[in-house]
Image: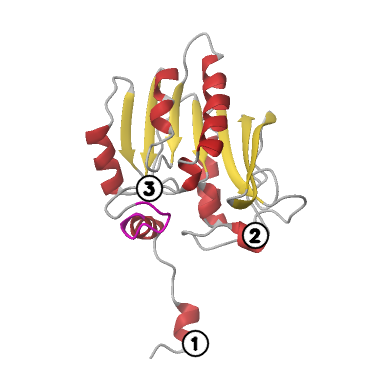
Amino acid sequence: MENRSSKKNKKPWPTKAVMQQIYELNLWGGRPHEFYSGLGSHKPEIVQPYLKVVSHFLSSFEKPLAVCDLGCGDFNIGKKLVKYTQKYVAVDIVPDLIEHHQKKFKAENLEFHCLDLATDDLPVTDCVLIRQVLQHLSNAEIQKVLHKLTDFKYILLTEHIPEGDFIPNIDIISGQGIRLKKQSGVNLLAPPFHFKVKEEKEMLSITSNDFKGRLVTTLYTT
C-alpha cells in the first residue's frame, strides 16, 4: 500500500501522457475511439460567436495572416478558419491526434505538427490562436510558453475564468482540470507572468447554462 509520504512525493504525469489519456478515455466526452475536445469545441452557442469574431478579425487584413493554432484539439473549430488564412499551422501534443488530422483534413495552406508547447520550438507566424489550452497547464508550463509568444504579433487567447473578481493564476498540476475549481483563472498580465503587450482588447465573452464562469477571448498585440 502506498503511504502518505510516497503520495506526497509522487511526481505528476508528463503533460503529453495526461492529454493522451484524456482522449483515450474520452474524459471530455464523445464516443469511444473518437477524438473529442469537449462542449467548448462543439456547442453552437459557444462555437459560432467565436468563429464569427475570429473570422472577422482574420478577414480584416488586406494580406491574409499566417496563423498558428496551439492546442488544436479535435480541429472542429480550426477547420472552419483555414480559409481565412495565408497559412494555417495546427499544433497539438498528442501524436495519434495529429496523425489522424493529417489523414482527414487536407488543404494547400494547412499543416499539422505534433509539438509540446512548453518544450518544443514553435512555428512562427503572424498570429497565434490559443483556445482553452493554458487553463489546463501549470504556471511553470505557461511561463515556458509565454517566452515564445513574443515571436507572434497577434495573440488571440481564450480562457475559462470565474464571474466577477477573482485571484488570478492560482497554480495547478497540468491535466484535465482547470483553475475554475479554485475560483481562479489565467491572466497573463498579472503575477507571476507579467506578460508585456502593446495592446489588450476583449473580443468576446460567453456565458452558458452548461458551465460556470465565462469564456473570454482577448486579443493581445505584442
Viewport quadrant of the C terminus: top right
Which one is earlier in the sequence, the residue at label 1 or at label 3?
1
Q: Is residue 11 magenta?
A: no
Q: Position of residue 30 (x, y in %)?
A: 37, 51
Circle 1/circle 2 CB separation < 8 Å = no
**Residue shown at the point (31%, 29%) measured from the top left:** 111
Q: Quadrant of residue 202?
A: top right
How far is mark 1 from mark 3, CA to CA? 35 Å
Which residue ends up furthest to the top in the rendered image?
62
Q: Is residue 205 left or right of residue 43?
A: right
Q: Height in image: 150 above or below 211?
A: above
Q: Residue at x 51, y 40 (%)?
A: 131
The residue under label 2 is 170
Cα gap from disc 2 to disc 3, whole angstroms: 27 Å
Amino acid type of the residue tagged 1 in the rendering? Arg
Q: Amino acid at mark 3?
A: Tyr
Give the SS element for disc 3. Answer: loop
On residue 88, the disc is: none
The residue located at (38%, 44%) in the rendering is: 120
In the rendered image, which residue does mark 3 sit on?
36
Tag 2: amino acid = Ile
Left or right of residue 10: residue 33: left
Report the residue marked by disc 1.
4
116 lies above or below 60: below
Circle 1: is it few (<14), some (14-19), or many (20+) Cα within 10 Å? few
Q: Is residue 185 left or right of residue 42?
A: right
Q: Is residue 107 above or below residue 179?
A: above
* Residue segment shown in magenta: 23-30
Say which of marks 2 and 3 sits in front. Answer: 3
Q: Earlier in the sequence, mark 2 or mark 3?
A: 3
Residue 149 position in % (x across, y down): 53, 36
Question: Crowdedness of circle 3 by 10 Å Cα count: few (<14), some, many (20+)?
Answer: many
